[in-house]
Amino acid sequence: MTDSWQLALARWSKAGLVDAATAERIRQFEASHEESSRLRWPILIAVGFGALMLAAGVLLFVSAHWDELSPGSRFSLILFLLVTFHVVGALTVGRFPALGTALHGVGTIALGAGIFLSAQIFNLQEHWPSGVLLWALGAWIGVWLLRDWVQCALAAILTPAWLAAEWIEATKHYWGSEDRILAEWMLLLAITYLTAFFGESRGQVRRAMAWIGGIVLMPAAAFAMVQQVWYSKSKLPAHLWFLGLAVGFAAPLLLAWYWRGKAAWMNAVATFWVAVLALLPGMATTNESTLHYGIRVLGPYLWSGMAALGLVAWGIQESRSERINLGILGFGITILVFYFSQVMDKLSRSASLIGLGLLFLVLAWGLERTRRRLVARVREGAA
């Protein structure tokens, strides 16, 4: 709620509805009451850990007694657990909102287990991505009813999971570039989530999106780079290939435009970077010309380095320190991977270890120094 009233106050001040003195008094009043109502991080950790342990304990109990129950009892137990989590969450959300939100989240997570366990109970062997779709629909119903960030985060995870499941199922009989299209889509979606939190467009939901994007960004980038190096010629039908590219490139860009408005032009630049990555040649062979061989070997590393530096510049422009941190991390990983794959095997064992040690020391000192200077610059500009 903190971000909500601050954004509203900024809009009112900009529109001239509230003068500067009144706005400052409102900020001081809210700041004086905010500390007493805000949950400290140990409480948040306790609530999150408790919810996780509760879900794990319930699943362990059910699995231990699963074989002893009849199909009707199994289904009744699943319904009872789902209803219990949400009912208890509804009863506690007024007095302890964090606990109520956590219990509602556990209930939505348990919905997925209930869907697939129900399919097992009744021996249903249908289109398996439909189960993920039902789970995602349950999360979206939670968003509509509860309007909290946990349900939004689950919906933001489960909806792409359903689309990925549909793509995997549709391309299971082919072998070629289907994983590459999936990797590029995951990378673009992670970038879109990461950049949803910027400027005055903040709040718990956007913060959760940024956390999801930040966690997924590096694995998605690594997946996309591996697919770029090792991809094989596409054997997908034309309609699947065009559908995959349309959803993979257009959907994240449209979502970025919805969240960021005119600032989505930077997401368009990121989309262009991924498109060029898809056009880079794959793994090099020794019987190629020197120029072609150099492009194949150095191209992915140079392109990755440009992406890392571009993410740092993006973070500086929009005063987001997490993008600077991720960009610096990506640049360091690119250099290390290049050393391991292209330099280390050409040196003796002792020379390669010495070089690796020196590289780690230089990277740790240089990149950390650069990161701190840039983050301090961003914080000074935001203050």
Image (spheres, rainbow, N blue to C red):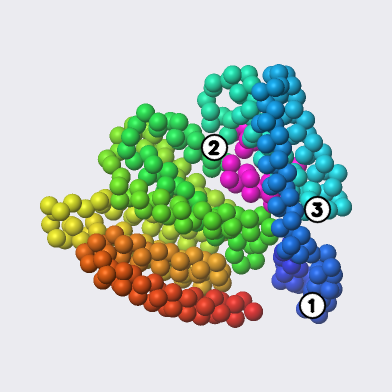
Image quadrant assignment for residue 2: bottom right
Which badge, 3 or 2, is on the more N-terminal residue? Answer: 3
Q: CA distance from mark 2 to mark 1?
A: 46 Å
Q: Amino acid at mark 1?
A: Glu
Label 3's element? Answer: helix
Which badge, 2 or 1, is on the more N-terminal residue? Answer: 1
The part of the chain drawn in magenta is 133-158
Camera-near label (2 vs 1) is 2
Quadrant the C terminus occupies: bottom right
Q: Which mark is residue 162?
A: 2
Camera-near label (1 vs 3) is 3
Q: Amino acid at mark 3?
A: Pro
Camera-side residue of 13 and 204: 204
Which badge, 1 or 3, is on the more N-terminal residue? Answer: 1
Q: Is residue 134 magenta?
A: yes
Camera-side residue of 129 and 191: 129
Residue that carries the numbered disc 1 in the rendered image: 24
Camera-side residue of 265 and 190: 190
Provide residue 186's location: percent of width, then percent of height. Answer: 47, 48
Residue that carries the numbered disc 3 in the rendered image: 97
Q: CA distance from mark 3 to mark 2?
A: 30 Å
Provide residue 45's location: percent of width, then percent of height. Answer: 71, 58
Visible in this render: residue 125? yes
Label 2's element? Answer: helix
* Label 3 crowd bin: few (<14), some (14–19), many (20+), radius 10 Å: some
- The furthest residue to the front: 350
Q: Is residue 337 magenta?
A: no
Q: Amino acid at mark 2?
A: Trp
